[in-house]
Amino acid sequence: MCGIIGYIGKKNALPILIEGLQRLEYRGYDSAGVALLTDHKLIIRKKAGKVADLIGAIGTNGLAGTLGIGHTRWATHGEPNDINAHPHWDCNEEIAIIHNGIIENYLTLKKKLENDGHVMHTVTDTEVLVHLIEEMYKRTKDLFSAVRLALLEVTGAYGILVVSKNEPDKIIAARKGSPLVIGLGDGENLIASDAAALVDHTRQVVYLEDGEIASLSMDTFFTKTIHDQDIIKEVEEITFDLEQIEKGGYEHFMLKEIHEQPNSLQNAMRGRLLLSEGNAKLGGLEPVMAQILKAPRFIIAACGTSWHAALVGKYMIEQLTGVPVEVDYASEFRYRNPIVRPTDVVFVISQSGETADTLAALREAKSKGALVIGIVNVVGSTIARETDAGVFIHAGPEIGVASTKAFTSQIATLSLITLALARAKGMPREHGLKIAADLEALPERVDRLLESASAIPEIVHEYKKVQHMLYLGRGSNFPTALEGALKLKEISYVHAEGYPAAEMKHGPIALIDENMPVVFIVPKDPIYEKVLSNMQEVRARKGRIIAVANEDDRDIEKFAEFVIRVPRTFNFFGPIVNIIPLQLFAYYMAVERGCNVDQPRNLAKSVTVE
């Protein structure tokens, strides 16, 4: 979850490190720090807070050096303060390390190292690792070998960069569970936890795999396994542009990404939706489509927002294909010894493709012989590389911590998969044509919705001081309610809960009074009347209602204090249009309450630790 950047070349490293940290700050922003080799000395500067606080701590004189590493932290072990910030160094201040991940056996290692005379100054697991490397360096007098041997004693996850003033011509990198990507330049090399930090310098990249260790110099690099086996790596190319990771005139990345959804939906469907045939063609699934069609059961594993998209997928797949679908929290999947058969197909959904729990679920499913399909956004990510087959959602870089366009693109991709499976299983062409037409119309409908959303800030202003809200929906809009509540919690810190509307009577109704706003997602679908009854129950208890309703619903004003209008669409695609006003509601609520929209407290974009 932390951001990592390293540079070795002919340029001054500090500006490159700072720029990289600013691009990576969405991965963690509790503290930040850099280590540079300058004048044969290893200099560390680090500071609690944002990268801007680090820049202030370094001062106007800055630091000069052509080799350096930088880190922006999401705290695990130890509170976010100056001391616990990365980088950390050894007893003699000759070796520095930055680390993303968790060293699970650090207490055992720490006790042994302290018995050997090492002195620790922090409570972090990372500091233990640099002292372990120091101990190995005493034996080997070679940094690469010292790091490799140290990692053989480590249990846990890591993405690390290590430098030493005694070997000022190299950066050592290693990964297990936390992503690292090498950027190859002309007379310079870089390495980062995300390609977004590299795209301004190079498009030629190499992805490290778990259990690999690399040594970077100015002109070259080499990789081995931590068991000392040589590896030949394939050079790949970054496909996104720098403009895609800039704000583009918007005040926040989240607002930009909400407004990008017409384009991201088009990109998810481009070349895949066969409008004239009422079908979908997914090249990434073609080699395994016969196996998917034979599967008696699907399992979908995901976390957070992706889990909500998975729930929408369950509604679609079960109703349109007749195949039973289980949706699992990836974080719970492997710990309950799940019943997974070789005939099952397991879908794993992750925006980043690096989510630690989802990756663990993937590996658990593969170990049981299931076919595993990835639905991810980031090309080159670990999940994309380890699944048997998959579909990219093509949402483009998503920088805001609260996921928006990835959610709707995930549902669009699940819709395409559902359509392809349903047609292959005998869905009439006429039905397929109707579904395909509704899918094709989604970008225009979302664009229209965004243009008519001016009333949402006024509604938010009315409710900006509330402390609790309920979000209620039925059918495929139950996941919409969950996602709307999650967005509000994530960025405005208002406690919110999503429920199936009918479940309100089984507990949450006790909370309803004039101080409890309730959001109802109430499209004109087959259970519209049922939701109106639930709204009446809230009104009878003086609850204040915000309704998300169709443009042509002329009766809804009688039931709600405020109405947000959305275009009508095919039932299962409703969550795509219905979630967007709830994303905007959360966004404007956070702005009204003075919250940091793109970097909400305690959260990070890519959850790469368990």
Image: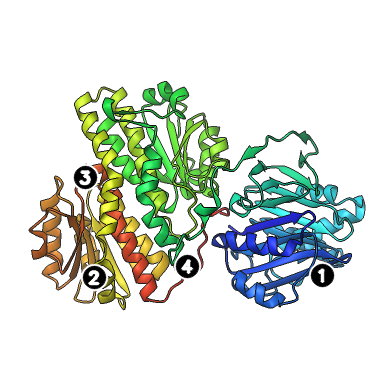
Residue 7 appears in view: yes
Tell me the number on the disc at residue 517.
2
Residue 443 locus on image (x, y percent): 31, 46
Give the foreground label among 3 and 4: 3
For the residues bearing labels 3 and 4, Cβ distance under 8 angstroms: no
Instruction: Kindly report which numbered mark, 1 or 2, lies closer to the viewer in this rendering.
Output: 2
Query: Mark 1 packing: few (<14 Cα in 10 Å), some, or many (20+)?
Result: some
Q: Callout 4, which amino acid?
A: Pro
Q: Nearer the viewer, mark 2 or mark 4?
A: 4
Q: Is residue 339 visible?
A: no
The residue at the point 71 percent across, 75 percent down is: 58
Disc 2 from disc 3: Cα separation: 26 Å
Q: In the shown orientation, is residue 216 left or right of residue 404?
A: right
Residues tagged 1 and 2 counted as in contact (Cβ below 8 A):
no
Q: Which residue is mark 3?
A: 569
**Cα distance in 3D space between marks 2 and 4:** 23 Å
Label 3 sits on a secondary structure element that is: loop
| Among the 4 quarters of the image, the one containing residue 283 | top left
The residue identified by callout 4 is: 600
* Amino acid type for the residue under numbered disc 3: Thr
Residue identifier under label 1: 119
Instruction: Give the x, y percent position of residue 19.
Output: 64, 62
**What's the residue type where badge 2 is placed?**
Pro
Q: Classify mark 3: residues with Cα within 10 Å, few (<14), some (14-19) or many (20+).
A: many
Element type at marker 2? strand
